[in-house]
Image (cartoon, grey):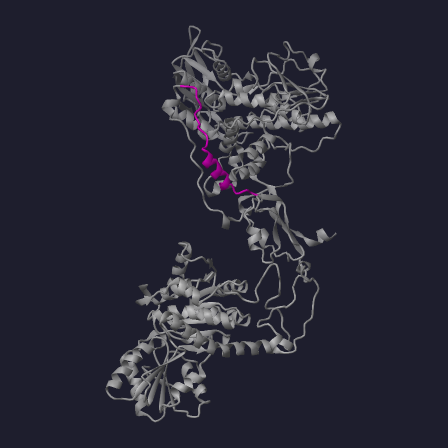
Amino acid sequence: MPEREARVIVFRSVEEMPPMPVSLGTTLYNKTGSWRYIRPVYRERTPPCSHACPAGEDIVAYLGLVADGRFREAWECLRRENPFPGVCGRVCPHPCEANCNRERLGGAIAIHEVERFLSDWAAEQGIVPAPGQPTRPERVAVVGSGPAGLSCAYHLALQGYPVTVYEADALPGGMLRTGIPSYRLPREVLNREIAAIEALGVEIRTGMRLGGNLSWDELATYPAVFLALGQQRSRALGVPGEEAEGVLHGLDFLKRVNRGETVPIGRRVVVVGGGNTAMDAARVARRLGAEVTVVYRRSRAEMPAIAEEVEEAEEEGVTFLFLAAPLEVLVEQGHVRGLRATRMRLGEPDASGRRRPEPIPGSEFILEADTVLPALGQEADLEGLPPDVGVEAGRVRIERSGETTRRGVFAGGDVATGLGTVTAAIGSGKRAALAIGRFLRGEPQPEYPPLPENVRAFPRPVLPEVVTFEELNTAYLRREPRPEARLRPAGERLHDWAEVRQGLELETAVAEGRRCFSCGTCNRCDNCLNFCPDISVRRRGDWHAGHPTYPYYEFDYDYCKGCGVCASECPRHAITMEEELLWRR
Amino acid sequence: MEKVITGNYAVSYGAKLARAQVIAAYPITPQTSIIEKLAAFCADGELDAVFIKVESEHSAMAACIGASATGARAFTATSGQGLLLMHEMLHWAAGGRHPVVMGAVNRGIAPGWSVWTEQSDTLAQRDTGWIQYYCESNQEVLDTVIQAFKVAETVLLPAMVVLDAFVLSHTSEVVDIPDQAEVDAYLPPFRPRWKLDVDDPHAFGALVTPNEWFELRYKIQQAMQEALEVARQADEEFGRRFGRRWGVVESYRMEGAEVALVTSSTITSTAREVVDAMRQEGIPIGLVKVRLFRPFPVPDIIEALSAVDKIAVLDRNLTFGQCGVFGEEIKAALYDSPRRPPVFDFVLGLGGRDVTPATIRQVAEYTLQHETPEERIIWVGVKR
């Protein structure tokens, strides 16, 4: 044990002295940390990806695990927040990537591809999520087995609650099964992720329609109910002639094809709309052999559909007619023969921030068609709900927690939010599950952020500030390109219903994990340790044996002088400098 | 193994054979190819060293000092303005007793800008406590880098190996590259008694009161004095092992010489030719080459020069307000000699102006023709 006391040495001759100015005693007694007025503290911040993820995935955490080749832990980390990684990796519009700081240095991390990789990898390895048994007495009813309903059921089950899910259709999955074609979402992926939820003791009762064979009185016997009915009613075209034979709502068309029915369509199909349902309908119609034209009243930039879906539709030979809107369905002998349409132009921005389309006078034209598939969005069908479940703007009215106006009844997903994406539905179902748990346990509800901001079921201590690109130390961050997506050739994929996108190879997934900046999140890069001029950063845990302990480093405040080099050299902005006085108090 | 290499590469090979562990350097003409080669050695795995890119020569020296303080063998190279920017850290290296070795390529000091050779940059550092060698050939450069580490680490003082810009730095000669195993046997790893150690922390370079300061300076001077004998022995041992010796001072054709030319660096080679020619003509002239400048080898100088009648010092440098630096040093050394022949101090070749055999013959003839110098500085070739 080295001495820690100051020692005074008096030299009697030059021979006793060392050659250079060096202290003979140790300097450990000199606690230079007392000079410090600001101290470094590891404080992780929110990365933009997980902030943007409506499902609340801890993206930076699982990317870091993938970078280390720890796929199993990555998959478990991913599934803790979202039971549908295989689904979301395929059909989520990935707002995480739109916000990724990597965008500026080579392209956003292909997060959805890594997410999908993890789900498929686990399935290939035969890894099945651990089954579970309810531990609490209160059984919760969930109405609707779409992503919101099943996410709610999953997160209730994780809290120990038994759940019964009621589904009107013959098979569970909601819009995931009926609305999304299998070339985007193979059914085995959906089935395995639903099966894993059932393995937690969640009971799914199909063929139970609210207002039909499922009465509100039956639901009212449950201590808590979650309504996740989705939006089942397609919006009308609102032009004369739309009742004619050959006009079929896009979503109904998809539902019937997805159920395996033979749907008669003509040679020339016109799809009206610019969302994902429109793209799905167009691409399904192409696979059924039709010539397809998509008519959209705004321009390409305003299309709500995922950009990749539009590109893939184009590759598959779908024709786009932008800035055009139908005025009338032309009918001959009761059957569609075309559309009378008008050219549009973009005017002033409307409430959605997009420029409002206006007809150009005198620009009418005829578009011949044998089948017209309007895909203009859906509305909620609220039949069967009791009058004390309040409604607002055609949707069930909810608090941020998901509570409706009726005590014990919660709602989420499109029937309440209208947000229209799988991940928003999953996030809203999870949030309601957490709120229902608190309600059943008699706990107060915390303040929830507005949807689609997320809530974590398993939160980490992370500061809420979102790390910007400017806050990263780019001296350590090279430009590295995003991998190209692997797609089957367009000509080949028109002949079958097999998946278009091929996912990532294992090596590419690992490379994506490594390419992640790990914004606001320590990933053991050692910069703080290497740059500390006072040797006051130490690793925690036995790193030689591969056992780092979180947080990975600790500061030796006895000797840290508070210079801040660690914080400024941290590439990811995961160290803050805090006033010493605040710590001394 | 023999290779045709430039003087700069000779520096690089010397540092590589010495197994420098940390190299911190900033590029400057005419030094650049030294560190480029070393960087390549590091990148190719031929040299197991940390190459630190720095933002200035001041930082380069600071990094070398830090590395040396931890017990690493540290090397750098610079020239002219870069050396001047290092000045503060040169004192620190010596005062902290860090045996860093540096390749220093002589270059005229701006303004006006010059990239050509002149010794004023290194000679301006003579009071920093650095050992200084001035080299005549590429082979001598390589050998001296290795010797310099040995001497520096023995006495715990830093050392400069000096070579002329372009005349050596960018001129290729056949150089024998010694075997690594032989160099390893000659130069064992650096194991300092005092070093920075996280597990046994001590304060280095802290405040020193008048009670100890004086003694620390005394010790540096003692080490410098010791370095002279250490340098002689290091050269002898080198000669035994590698078959080449350079001496701290070399006498050339001094038998019966009445006039001695005193030279350093590459002017020496030209002067040898002139001495040979004049000897053939029967003129009793010889040459004394000063290789080790710090510590100044006073006894060796007295021994070599006290017997002649006249001494001509060739200075490719100038200390303003005095004279050429070698002239000044030779005069000071001879003050301790029982015989003090007149010293003619010739200042020539500044800023890389060519020093040809004709220039040196002019120096020799002036010395032969005059009993004593007419001026304190005899300017050679100044258009006045």
Q: Is A507 in the magenta?
A: yes
Quarter of the image where the C terminus of chain B is located = bottom left
* Up/down of B168 relative to B281, above or below: above
Q: Position of residue A210 (x, y in %)?
A: 63, 13
Image quadrant where residue A233 sits? top right
Q: Residue furthest top?
A: A333
Q: Position of residue B32 (x, y in %)?
A: 39, 63
Q: Name which residue lies at 47% across and 9% down.
A: A244
Residue A145 can be seen, yes or no:
yes
Q: Residue furthest right?
A: A442
Q: Which residues are magenta?
A: A496-519
Quarter of the image where the N terminus of chain B is located = bottom left
Q: Position of residue A21 (x, y in %)?
A: 60, 71
Q: Name which residue lies at 41% across and 78% down.
A: B248
Q: Is A532 in the magenta?
A: no
Image quadrant where residue A214 sits? top right
Q: Name which residue lies at 34% across and 72% down.
A: B137
In the depicted view, which residue is nearer to us: A166 or A202?
Answer: A202
Q: Position of residue A445 (x, y in %)?
A: 72, 30
Task: Please indicate whether residue B130 sits to the left or right of residue B288 in the image.
Answer: right
Residue A365 can be seen, yes or no:
no
In the depicted view, which residue is nearer to us: A352 or A110?
Answer: A110
How many marks are shown on the rendered structure? 0
Q: Residue furthest bottom?
A: B371
In the depicted view, which residue is nearer to us: A245 or B118?
Answer: B118
